[in-house]
Image (tube, rainbow, N blue to C red):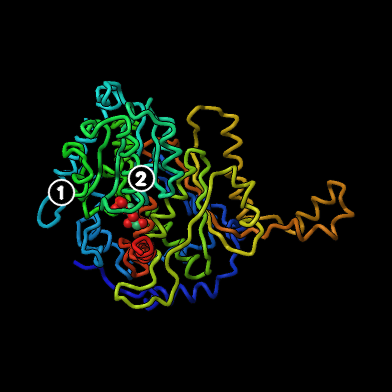
Amino acid sequence: MALKNTNPTTTKAWQKLTDHFNENKNINIKDLFKNANRKEEFSIEFNDLHLDFSKNRITKETLSLLVELAEEVDLKDAIEKQFNGAVINVTEGREVLHTALRSTSEDAVLVNNKNIKPQIQTALRKIKSFSNKVISGKWKGYTGKSITDIVNIGIGGSDLGPDMIVESLQFYKNQLTTHFVSNVDGDHVSEIIKKLNPETTLFVIVSKTFTTQETITNAETIKDWFLKSATIFDIPKHFVAVSTNLEAVNNFGIDKANVFPMWNWVGGRFSLWSAVGLSISLSVGFDNYKALLNGAEEMDLHYRNTDFDKNIPVILALLSIWYNNFYGAETEAVLPYSQYLKKLPDYLQQAIMESNGKGVDRNGDKINYQTGTIVWGSTGTNMQHAFMQLVHQGTKLIPADFIGYKESLYGLTDHHNKLMANYNGQINALAFGKSKEEVHLELKTTGNQDKIATLLPFKVFEGNRPSNAILFDKLTPKSLGKLIALYEHKIFTQGILWNIYSYDQFGVELGKELAKKLLDK
Ligand code: F6P
């Protein structure tokens, strides 16, 4: 049942891709658009999602060779193994089943010969009934008042996912105010505490291991602060936990009834679909939380059942490999044209870089090709006034994902038209640039003939800078679930192709150990 183990650079497809790259590396996106049908030929519609990947340095042949690579390393087999619960997180001896958390099918998924679907359903029911009680005001604090504030205490996957989703779904939020404490920097927790009333605040401590230094330190500080006005008998009304470590949760003083489960077969950075997402459900209500899961499931089914040349996560993964491993691109930008998605780049940094930032392959051998892409980004249009100069005219090749929505949520059409004109303007500027001739003509027709000699080279845009347009109808819990699952599957696909293990994270340990030693001195 183990994953196959193929060094991608030794495959026939890789050799063909290398030859193809050497022959075509100077291809220009502008020339490719001489084919009037290019946009249609390199676009995929999937319900409310439209992917336009026509503005890439690829031909049909490039795509078919990349697909050949995916087939040669048997990506299909790996996808099935992941969905079916094989122990594909070999170094930690674990299944990888975040997809089971959002599956609505009746099919059993077995872990140690036991179907995990019933426990997932039980956890969902518990999230639902708890969220309903808190949101409706039936859940009372120690002085009999309803809850007004939620504080999620966690870090990494126990913070970034819920925080990003709560921020992104602000439009769908209820009356509760949600806060996130993560950093061990005491000023972070102090600033949050300052805003809180202990009588009306609910603390959700999220830690798979319940040993993470930052989370436990923040939780203890908050408990001490709480106990200045309340007693230990009031803790059950104000503290709940999401964890696999029941003993540590119990030692912290949390009531058994207030513990939501986590499982070893869900990785931290893929856990927002589990009870780790409790603060999401509290913030936008269970129905919206469930819609988020349903959107993810829709993408899961697409990923699992669609041919690779029409498969959105697979295509995005292959394109990323094309630039990373053949063009030598160092980074990728994620550029959402929605202020709601301002935390998406941070979230994706953990998901992508903790997963695929690996330097040994599945044999344990040092890798001699590039893996893990560096991802960064920010929202449009703000970033146009920040880093886009470098993306347009700098010396680096930076493939970019432009995420956009056809409709805005509040319906300010004038704003939205401007936003989307910028979205398309940036994509076209990157792809097609502005030639010497165009700059020449422009300076001439604007009466700046005398400046041509001095200004022309600075005003030229080379273009040929690749991007993908990921366009949804509207930002909804469902479409957001789809978007996040898309990136999760892109990550897995790349890990399979690079022959690495995407689901461990030993690289974060050494620094933690050394910090602990320094503290123990
Ligand atoms: O940063 C390492 C890490 O293990 C992440 O993978 C995880 O999301 C985070 O720490 C938090 O871990 P826990 O949920 O166990 O507190």
- Residue 158 x/y as whole percent: 33, 48
Residue 452, image quadrant = bottom right
Regarding residue 386, the answer to whether it shows in the image is yes
Q: Secondary structure at mark 2?
A: helix
Which of the numbered marks, if any, corresponds to residue 448? Answer: none
- Residue 69 x/y as whole percent: 38, 69
Sequence-wise, which precedes: disc 2 or disc 1? 1
Query: Taking 283 as reference, is 214 above or below it?
Result: below
**Residue beneath disc 1:** 116
Q: Quadrant of the C terminus?
A: bottom left
Please say if the residues under marks 2 and 1 sit with CB atoms less than 8 Å apart. Answer: no
The front one of 463 and 347 is 347
The front one of 333 and 457 is 333
Look at 48% across and 38% down and name the residue there: 340
Query: Taking 52 as reference, is 513 above or below it?
Result: below
The answer to whether the residue bearing label 2 lies less than 8 angstroms from the nearest atom of ligand 1 is: no
